Image: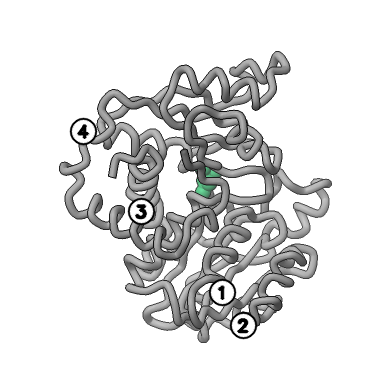
Amino acid sequence: MRHLMNPMDFSVEELDKLFDLAADIEKDPKKYAHMCEGKKLATCFYEPSTRTRLSFESAMINLGGSVIGFSDAGSSSAAKGESVSDTIRVISCFADICAMRHPKEGAPMVAASRSGIPVINAGDGGHQHPTQTLTDLLTIRSLKGRLDNFTIGICGDLKFGRTVHSLVNALARYDKVHFVFISPEELRIPSYLREMLWDKALSFEEVIRLEDVMPRLDLLYMTRVQRERFFNEEDYVRLKDFYVLTKEKMERAREDMLVLHPLPRVNEISVEVDDDPRAVYFKQVQYGVYVRMALILTLLELV
Ligand code: CP
């Protein structure tokens, strides 16, 4: 039985297969409409979510399966003190696969170690968000036609943003990816990621100004400042609007540069950018459903 805790749990070859499957699902969804009949997905979300939880639920329903779960720790027996280990042992009696989001780093890993069913990490604290990374990679592969040989700017809260941590780890395995990390000093990438890039002799730079690097980017991955991970409100307020992607800044970008964002957005992308054909963050959400369908089929060994 396999779990998904980290995008690195799949080899590059396995990811290729997963993305091929997701692309086939996009092309011919009817072919997959009954593949999970009789199967249940449990969504155990101890932290708020719109996209991840609902795209998992949508994915399972699209596959003919059904969904149980909770969207708030307060409405589960966690509020009475039940441990994640006990909860997953219980959920294993009810469902065939579980997607879990938790504010504590490593909680889905603890669950996986006691689980009778595959567990998918749907985001754990500021650590990892592997299914967002699968979504990001499928979006890039589908719209750019490749996962190598590009310059990607990653902008915003690189310290606390789990989507950033998972994406950098995943992209570090592809050839000729140059990273441009754009953040204020206080929100730079964690040192373990910088060391990983140094160890692998990968090409990266760290800058503060977004405007200066725009003309060099093939992809721009914008992120939200993660209010929920800050230790004090004052720092959050000072940093929250450090970057705002506007129409004027987009004028400095290449014609074929793509803007991605894991969403939710707060102020970091002006709504006027949404109409720019290079803004693909809402398309990205749709790819999230296809890739989660492919993941459920893969972990349930139905393909
Ligand atoms: N991208 C993402 O994880 O969104 P949600 O928090 O809405 O699930």
Q: Is mark 3 within 8 Å of ligand 1?
A: no
Q: Which secondary structure lies at badge 3? A: helix
Nearer-N-terminus badge (1/2): 1
How far, Cα to Cα, is label 1 from label 2?
12 Å
Can you say whether 246 is above or below 128 in the image? below
Q: Position of residue 159 (x, y in %)?
A: 72, 60
Q: Which residue is located at x 54 percent, y 52 percent? A: 265
Disc number for residue 153: 1
For image coordinates 58% across by 44% down, the residue present is 123
- Residue type at tag 3: Tyr
Numbered label tally: 4
Marks 1 & 2, CB-CB < 8 Å contact: no
Task: Give SS at disc 4.
Answer: loop
| Circle 1 or circle 4, nearest the eye | 4
Is 230 located above or below residue 302 in the figure? Answer: below
Front residue of 196/281: it is 196
* Quadrant of the rendered image containing residue 280: bottom left
Residue hosting label 3: 287
Closest to the observer: 117 or 216?
A: 117
Q: Find disc 2 in the rendering and name its residue.
A: 203
Which residue matches tag 4? 34
Residue density around tag 3, few if under 14, some if 14–19, many if 20 or more, within 10 Å = many
Residue type of the residue flagged with mark 1:
Gly
Disc with the residue nearer the chain's start (4 vs 2): 4
